[in-house]
Amino acid sequence: MQLAMAAQMRELDRQTIEEIGIPGMVLMENAGRGTVERMEQAFGPVAGKTVCVFAGPGNNGGDGLVIARTVHGLGGFPFVFFPLAPERLTGDAGQNFAVYQRLRLPYQVLDNQEKLFTLADTVLTLNRMHPIHSLVDALFGTGLEREISGGFLDTITCMNALRDRHRLPVVSVDMPSGLHSDTGAVLGGAVAADLTVTYGLAKPGHFHHGGAHVGRLACIDIGIPAKLVARMGLQGTLLDRELADLLRPRPATAHKGVNGHLLILAGSAGKTGAALLCGRGALRSGAGLVTFAVPGDLNPIFETAIAETMSVPLPASQGFLSIDDYQRIEALCTGKNGIVLGPGIGTEEATVQLVLRLYNAYPGPMVADADALAILAGHPDILRNPAGARIFTPHPGEMARLLDTSIEAIQADRLAAAQWLGGDGAVGRPPLITVLKGAGTVVAAAGGDWAINGSGNPGMATGGMGDVLAGIIGGLLVQGHDPWEAACLGAHLHGLAADRIAADRPYGYTATEVARHLPQVIGSLRPQSH
């Protein structure tokens, strides 16, 4: 699924109206009618029931007026609340208000504090007259940039209270009001919707932070021509089950040698678990062979922990990986299809020197995770010119260190944070890809392409999940997926495996269990072998 930024969506609307000649009133009519159709699919027929519409001062309010009129035509009882005088509406929204007036349908202007104070009582009175079907949030659309305050914030607070205390379903038009369309940031306050119906294309704000305010999302066609969308050159996508097309069938003659060999440099005293979880992720994602390069004194742990992997003890590395074993590690890299560097390695000086040298010199694809990211954050001068493809897998704290900012700043605009390498995706340079973990994991490539993951759940907020993810991505890399595919597939499969568990156990499951479920998830998506 393609995703559009707010400015791109406005431009598509403009081109549709001015270049193609489809009137804005037609687009608005399609939007309103399509929304009611989805409302009925979600919450049943509107006939005989009240629909309260909260109509804002712009085109979002115009959509709300079409919704109200459509409800009336279906035998329902619309009631529109205007935070500002509706006579101020202009353009298509103003014309729809004029139609609404001529139909003599009821509305109220929330133009003083008393009406705001009694708004909930007014809604509940309407509910006693005819049961309320839903509350429709048509206050603000995708263009909101400023903090919400005053009567608008009071209205949103009241809507949320009616939803929570009286279980009245809330439907948001295009974007829950108060939510930034591009970043998903809450601008002072935001509607908590049960259903969001968006128009033309979904927006990144629907998925950032796990879509906490969005509820179910429905995307409807309102008449924007597909050729305009194609011409726009959108770079954002949602990672969903369409990624199954990237999974390739394995030939009947496949053997471990053709399924890739991953080298994992991970673990230190007290942190061998991170390395082992990484190995499990790689094996369960389908890697043919996995080898650990480990501190010599820790090798007995690796020899007995995962029977299907190999381990190489590094004699000069005791308790942690050391630059003194570089030549041995360099030799181990020969014949490997990729490496994962970082889970649980610590930040001893000898380890720092090893990470920096490998980052610079290793010509194959590398997943840089955990402690490797902490080390690289202290040496930003080397980040943009490695010898091979690099996939960074930071959580928000690690991303904050890489950008020398706060976690709050990272979370306020996760897409911008993941795009920290900007346009450094020039032809001839190795791919640099960032996987910013969290609710709505963001994948971004230097050069412009970006994606938001649609799988995963809050039960994943437990230790070791990132280690498994690094292993999954590494495992996909060595199986022949290019770095972008490996990053996107890895993030999505990881979340799907957790979602499979969460269907029965919403939390309390472990990273090991997520790795264990990967083959079933891949099997449900992958084309059959031939």
Image (tube, rainbow, N blue to C red):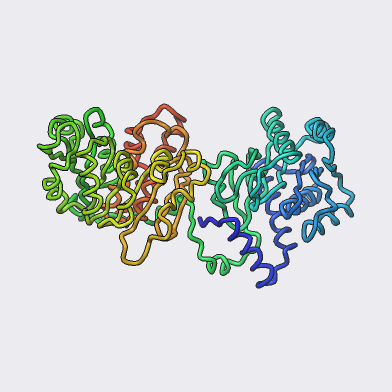
Q: How many marks?
A: 0
Taking depth in this image into account, of 54 and 430 the one nearest to the observer is 430
Picture coordinates of residue 439, whole percent (x, y): 48, 40
Taking depth in this image into account, of 434 and 125 the one nearest to the observer is 434
Picture coordinates of residue 93, whole percent (x, y): 78, 56
Q: Residue at x 73, y 55 (%)?
A: 59
Q: Is residue 522 above or below residue 120?
A: below
Picture coordinates of residue 290, whole percent (x, y): 20, 44
Q: Judge left or right: residue 163 versus residue 302.
A: right
Q: Judge left or right: residue 330 versus residue 399.
A: left
Quarter of the image holding residue 459? top left
Quarter of the image holding residue 343? top left
Quarter of the image holding residue 113? top right
Q: Residue at x 62, y 64 (%)?
A: 11
Q: Residue at x 66, y 66 (%)?
A: 14
Q: Is residue 94 above or below residue 320?
A: below
Q: Judge left or right: residue 194 versus residue 442.
A: right
Q: Is residue 507 visible?
A: yes
Picture coordinates of residue 423, whole percent (x, y): 42, 60
Q: Is residue 472 visible?
A: no
Quarter holding the C terminus is bottom left
Q: Judge left or right: residue 121 versus residue 162.
A: right
Taking depth in this image into account, of 180 and 327 the one nearest to the observer is 327
